[in-house]
Amino acid sequence: MSKIWLIVLAFATYSPSICAFSKQDQMPADFVSLAEIAPDIKIEMKYAGSDNFIGRPIAGYEAEKCLLTRPTALALQKSQQWLTQFKLQLVVYDCYRPQKAVTEFVQWSKDLNDTKKMESHYPKVAKANLFSEGYIATKSGHSRGSTVDIGLTGLDAGAPFDYFDPVSHTRAEQISTAARATRALLCATLERFGFVNYDKEWWHFTLKNEPHPNQYFDFPIR
């Protein structure tokens, strides 16, 4: 089956499921590096550099490394293995996120004069509304270690990662047929292996049976 027909089939059959703070400085034993579990997945940790909605490396990201709970990493490994037969590759943009990084997001949001990344990341949504409209949270599922921001290399998804706008909603209608197919394929693949999508961000997925559903970690990424 060709790549195009795979995407069309996935889009045609996909029906999406709309999709206690505990500070710890040491990485728990059940966290792993995705590169060691699934080396075929591309890693582009946006918050370890300056290519993000703030425009600088974020607190806690001391290495460009994707850390996740082992069950999450294994589920991504299976997802990539399934996609490999169609010559498709997953790319992760963010994985485990220290709580200190979330705190930096909150602090940044209070400085309404800092809008240097507005044009590229939130041109139509007022910075003051990014939290209330659900694009950023004061407590992130990423800090539990089983949420990942992810895409497919080489395929158009209709909006880039961390583009805060209704067009990034998973089922947005104002995108091309090809972009809708890309999102459908991504969702169908990840849901096949146990993930649930967040409906306001096509790239955001959480392992349904995550091991730490009520615990938020703060150890640095090293």
Image (tube, grey):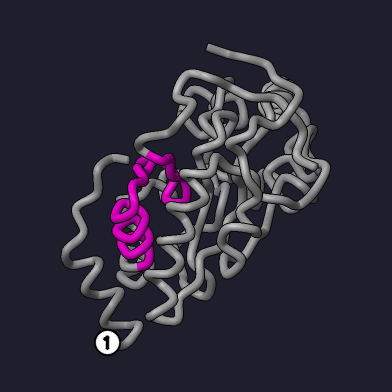
Tell me which residue sits at (42%, 50%) in the image.
202
Tell me the amino acid under the disc marked 1.
Met
Tell me which residue sits at (21%, 73%) in the image.
9
Does the magenta-highlighted stretch encompass residue 179?
Answer: no
Q: On screen, 198 above or below 108?
A: below
Q: Which residue is mark 1?
A: 1
Element under disc 1: loop
User: Is residue 112 visible to us here?
Assistant: no
Nearer to me, 145 or 135: 145
Q: Picture quarter containing residue 11?
A: bottom left
Tell me which residue sits at (43%, 44%) in the image.
205
Tell me which residue sits at (72%, 45%) in the image.
47
Q: Position of residue 153 (x, y in %)?
A: 53, 71
Q: Taking 138 as reference, is 214 left or right?
A: left
Q: On screen, 200 above or below 110?
A: below
Q: Position of residue 53 (x, y in %)?
A: 68, 43
Residue at the top extreme, as displayed: 20
